[in-house]
Amino acid sequence: MLLELRDLTVQFPSAEGPIKAVDGVSFQLDEGQSLGIVGESGSGKSMTALAILRFIPRMGSVSGQVIFEGDNFPWHGNSVTCLVTKHLG
């Protein structure tokens, strides 16, 4: 398995309580496969991609797991740098 996303949730605070931009997204992608994510404007497509890359604004909170080539990348720290260093050298 190349990439696995498990139960991704992205939330942002508001005066009325947390707003879920992404709610429980999961998928698996094997090497050589492609994945298209489609949906209406505001449905969380871009936020899903940004969360995988750890580019969510600081006020956002993220939960779930991103597993790349068997390695689970934590939400804290600079996991994108770790990913690039380990897999691209």
Image (cartoon, helix red, strand yellow):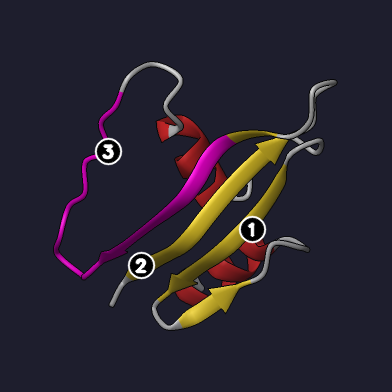
Q: Quadrant of residue 63?
A: bottom right
Q: Residue at x 74, y 34 (%)?
A: 18
Q: Residue at x 52, y 40 (%)?
A: 22
Amino acid type shown at disc 1:
Ser
Q: Earlier in the sequence, mark 2 or mark 3?
A: 2
Amino acid type shown at disc 2:
Leu
Location of residue 74 in the rendering, given as x and y in whole percent from the top left corner: 67, 70
Q: Is residue 39 left or right of residue 87?
A: left
Query: Crowding at label 3, few (<14), some or many (≥20) Cα neighbours within 10 Å?
Result: few
Q: Secondary structure at mark 3?
A: loop
- Real-space Cα separation, disc 1 to disc 3, in angstroms: 20 Å
Query: Crowding at label 1, few (<14), some or many (≥20) Cα neighbours within 10 Å?
Result: some
Q: Specify whether residue 1 is painted magenta.
A: no
Mark in front: 1 vs 2:
1
Q: Residue at x 67, y 39 (%)?
A: 11
- Real-space Cα separation, disc 2 to disc 3, in angstroms: 15 Å
In this rendering, the answer to whether 76 lies above or below 86 is: above
Residue 56 visible (yes or no): no
- Real-space Cα separation, disc 1 to disc 2, in angstroms: 16 Å
For the record, the magenta segment spans 21-39
For mark 1, what is the residue? 63
Q: Quadrant of residue 41?
A: top left
Q: Secondary structure at mark 1?
A: strand
Mark in front: 2 vs 3:
3
Q: Is residue 86 left or right of residue 62?
A: left
For mark 2, what is the residue? 3
Q: Which mark is residue 37?
A: 3
